[in-house]
Image (spheres, grey):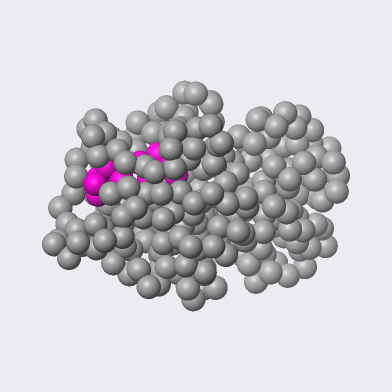
Amino acid sequence: MRNTRCMITLLCSLSLASISLSAHAGIDKIRLTAEERTYLVSRAPIKLCIDPNWMPYEAWDPKLGYIGIAADYVAVFSAMLDVKFQVRETKTWQQSLDVTRSGGCDVLSFLNQTPRRSQWLLFTTPYVEAEAALATLKNMHGIRNLKSLRGKTVAVVEGYVYEEYLRNNYPRVIVSRVDNTDDALQKTADGKVDATIESLFVLRYKIAKLGLKNLTVSGRTKYVNRYRFGVRKDQAMLRKILDKAIMQIEPKVENKILRKWSLEHNY
């Protein structure tokens, strides 16, 4: 498996919902079988559901379209496979899950694999990995890990893997569902919940972006996000094709992504 770790980040803004970068400089097309090529031609554009408010990983911007880390990866994979991806606009991550499950999208862009999700999705190899962490008020002491949250309330975005993980492994942690990470952090800043659990990189980005100066990343977890494509089970060929692209993306492309985000945001 490719050793792609967490801070792989490059802002990629696309003015339209359809992504087609076959002329992308330095991106080589990969070889596909005749069957795979026929499949892509018949399915194009590939219908993609995303998290509409999850920067810096991904978001839908009314003016810029699909932006964020996952957007840049999708643009590269689009170039490698010479196929368009079309983003279907949704309001929340849970809506994206529901739309895909009902057949409205072929694939979800950036999510963890779980037993529950595996009942209706096929997963590719991970293409980004990132540690999960906790955000709390700066003056709240004693929260350093998930064990220290026993009896306390944690904000979790509805549909995120963390709710399933907490209920299975830390049943005495109280889960408070929210629509997005912005809401989770605002509730934490207002003292309405004790903590937010999220990717470490997202927490640092969001706390700075939202200007929540009374919050801090107070603890780490043992949970590592392994972000993948989630493909509907009736589109097994698409999973196979996306895996080919993931396995063949060049390290220099990923290094460029990492360097740009590190320089722009100092994370």
Q: Nearer the viewer, residue 114 or 131?
A: 114
Task: Name the dominant secondary structure of the magenta segment.
Answer: helix
Question: The C terminus appears in which quarter of the rendering?
Answer: top right
Q: In the figure, 247 relative to 203: above or below?
A: below
Q: Nearer the viewer, residue 104 or 114?
A: 104
Q: Nearer the viewer, residue 171 or 39?
A: 39
**Residue range (magenta):** 70-82
Can residue 49 be found in the magenta stretch? no
Q: Does residue 109 appear anywhere in the picture?
A: no
List x then y, in percent, for residue 179: 69, 52
- Residue 114 left/right relative to 37: right
Q: In the figure, 264 relative to 199: above or below?
A: above
Residue at 63% x, 67% y: name it: 164
Residue farthest toward the right in the current orientation of the protein = 191
List x then y, in percent, for residue 125: 36, 59
Q: Nearer the viewer, residue 93 or 171?
A: 93
Residue at 28% x, 49% y: name it: 83
Question: The N terminus appears in which quarter of the rendering?
Answer: bottom left
